[in-house]
Structures are given as C-alpha cells and as structure tokens.
Image: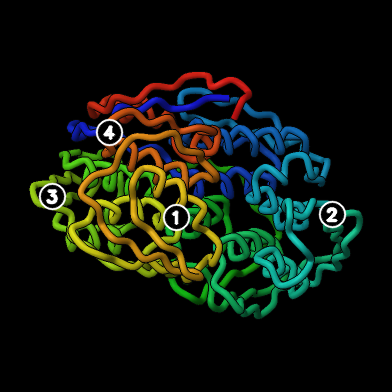
Amino acid sequence: MDKFIIQGGKPLNGEIKISGSKNAALPLMVATLLSPGKYTLHNVPELRDIRTMAHLLRIIGAKIEFADHTLIIDTTQADFPEAPYELVKTMRASIYVLGPLLARFKAAKVSLPGGCAWGPRPVDLHIKGMKKLGVELNLDGGYIVANCRKLKGSHIHFDVSSVGATGNVMMAAVLADGMTILENAASEPEIIDLGHFLIRMGARIEGLGTKTIQIEGMPGLHPADYTIIPDRIETGTFLCAARITGGKITLRNCQPKQLLEVLEKLKESGAEMVIRENEITLKSTTPIQPVNVTTDVYPGFPTDMQAQWIALMSLAAGSSVVTDSIFTDRFTHVPELNRLGAQIVQKNNSVFIQGVNELKGAPVMSTDLRASASLVIAALAAKGKSEVFRVYHIDRGYEKIELKLQQAGAEISRENAGDVI
C-alpha cells in the first residue's frame, strides 16, 4: 500500500498539463455499449477508475486497448448484460451501465453500489427514471434486475438534479421509442460532453447545458471517435495547491469556463490570475483572505472542490465557513487536517475554519478521493515532513499527481507503506 512523503513549505512554481476528465470519460466508455462496433476515445486519463471500468466492459464482452491516453473499445461481441458486485462496490459509476444495457439488450443485472439501500438514496433517481421509460425492475440478492420489451419515451422530472441519473437515463432514452424530456436535469460539463458524444453517434439531443433536455429516440446509433474534455476538478485542485503554498503556476490544456465559480472565489482570496481560452496562470503575492463557500449544483461551487477549499482556508488570515449542500457527510478530511495544525470545527453539513499562521507536517490518512487531495495540498504548505497514507484513493481521480507536482517544484515522493496502515 503506497504513501506520499511530502516535505512542505516550498511554493509551487512551474507548469502542469491537465489530464482528461475522469467523470466525463467513465460514462463515455459505457456509452460504447449502445451500438456494436469500434470506438476510439482520446485524452483519457490513466487512472484506477478507468481501469476498473475497462475491466467491467471486458466482463460484458468488449475488447479494449489502452495506450498513450487513447482508449480503443470494440463492443461488437459484448453480450453479457451484468455488472457484478465485486466491481460496482469499488466504483459507484459502474451503475452507468444500466441504461446502455437496457437500451441494447432490453435486460440488465447490475449490483447496487456498496452500502446503498433500495430507499431514497441517489441510486433511486436512476431507478425512477428507468421505470418511467417502461422498465420493470426488481431487487434480488443485492442486484437490480431489469427487463423491458421496448423502451418508451417519457416526461421525467428529477426531484434532485443528479449527474449520474441524468447521464444514465439519457443513454437509455437515445434508443427509446419516441420523445423523452428530462426536467431538472444536470447541466455539468460532463453531461454536456456525454451528450456531444451521443450526438456524434447519431443521437438527437437538444438542451444540453440547460435544466431541460429533449431526446428524440432513434432506431439505432453507430460508433464514433471522440476527445474527452479536461478535468475541471484537477484544475481547481492544482490552483488551490499553488495558492496555499504562495506559489505561481500555469495550467495548460484546461477549460477555465468550466469552473468560473472556483476562479471567482480564488480571486476573492487574493490570488492574481491570467485566464486564457485553454490556460490559467495563478500567482500568489498577498496573504490568503478568508472566503465563505457553499457548494451547489453546476454552475455553482462544486462539491468535489469542497475539501480542497477547506484546506486552503485553514491558512487564511481570518475565519471562514464552508457548507456542503450536496452531501451532508463528506467531511472525513477535517480531523486529518486538524492533525496538521488546522483549526476546523464541523457542525452538521458546515465547517467553521479559523485560519492559522502555519501548518506543521504530520502523518495523515486518506479516506476518499477528494479528501486525499486536500491532505496533499495542505501537506505541501505545512512546515516539515508529512506522510499521507492510503493514496490509492487519490489514484482513482488524479493521474500521477506526485509527478505533476514535482514538475512544479514540490518535494513529494511515493513509497510503499507496507500493510501496517
């Protein structure tokens, strides 16, 4: 089990190229199941979650080649419409296969994500959407067992704007009979990217980027090639890393328009930025100013940047409040940040941060993907040596993050921590 060794207190200074978006790549990989044939996806990040999804597609019957950020998927012989628990428990995005499998095979057996009940949880939005399209679903041994004679277009209103449910239902609806209208749909860049890929395959979709998406079902689609958008969360993470260390960084191959709220908050914190079409340069010349944040659905402040922002605010010149309106229990990084000397108190779905003059190196434990990122950037700013354990979490969503940080002058290395932790 790997760990990061970080010698903090050194400002980042350099250039980093942003990788392709994990959250965009995963549903596009699954969408290749909709029509048999060979697909080529470019700018695909080399990540643990990508490998997990590739393994799932192989189980279903697809042939996959992956090299130099290019993923070739051949779904010609995919004929096993099942997603086993062993894979779904490690990555919730595996449930994305439900819609494409139903659209192509009219049947699917997909494990419920680990720890997820049949009740009013996020997966329930997927279920309700599929039922609206005429699917019969049952729970059997922890699996969603679904069948349909024919998918039928429907008017679907999501009680909560959900990226996963929007994408899943959209993939099913492109092969349904008739028109499907999705209301209160997600408008995130990753949904727009999925929609553009489906359109490239021959789908008819209107309203991408708005709360109402219209999908005219087609009798069939065809394979297509596509280039994945840059990862906006990786972009935001590196910007926070540069700001917290008082450094200067230029990020290339990014799309600033995808994270305008994060950029605005960074400006409020005192960062100087030069923003171009596909490039951002951030420079830190003044103390970090406290800035309150409340996460919200796109285009609001992303919940996937909440942990990194809390780390940044731990060194602000004053107090701040961060509230997560998307998830109420996503604060496992708080006690670990406090181990580095932060002064953070959690109350319900908000944290109250009193900025300190300095953080000090310490051993800390990663608990999930974004929590891992917050610990890494805090450790980069902390004086002395830090050890970040269980970095397999961060490998799910950040491509070779230690190598990218090294390019910007960070003293960070990966070592094997053994099986003690």
Q: Which mark is residue 16?
A: 4
Q: Quadrant of residue 419?
A: top right
Q: Which mark is residue 12?
A: none
Viewer-nearest residue: 228 or 225: 228
Quadrant (top left/top right/bottom left/bottom right) for the N terminus: top right
Q: Is residue 149 visible?
A: no
Q: Measured from the top left, where is residue 132 in percent x and y?
A: 74, 75
| Disc 3/disc 2 C-alpha distance (Å) | 50 Å
Q: What is the three-letter code of the residue carrying label 2?
A: Tyr
* Classed neighbour count for the residue bearing mark 2: other residues with Cα under 10 Å, few (<14), some (14–19), many (≥20): some
In the picture, measured across the screen, residue 177 lies left or right of residue 325, that is right
Viewer-nearest residue: 79 or 311: 311
Q: How is the image coloured?
A: rainbow
Question: Looking at the picture, does residue 137 appear above or below residue 101?
Answer: below
* Classed neighbour count for the residue bearing mark 1: other residues with Cα under 10 Å, few (<14), some (14–19), many (≥20): many
Q: Which mark is residue 304?
A: 1
From the viewer's perspective, is the residue at label 1 or at label 2 nearer? Answer: 1
- Report the residue that reaches farthest toward the left: 285
Viewer-nearest residue: 410 or 352: 352
Q: Quadrant of residue 218?
A: bottom right
Q: Measured from the top left, where is residue 194 in percent x and y?
A: 52, 54
| Disc 4/disc 1 C-alpha distance (Å) | 20 Å
- Residue at 84% from the left image edge and 60% from the top image edge: 146
Q: Is residue 367 visible?
A: yes
Q: What is the three-letter code of the residue carrying label 1?
A: Asp
Q: What is the three-letter code of the residue carrying label 4?
A: Ile
Mark 3 lies on residue: 274
| Secondary structure type for disc 4 | strand
- Residue at 48% from the left image edge and 36% from the top image edge: 44
| Secondary structure type for disc 3 | strand
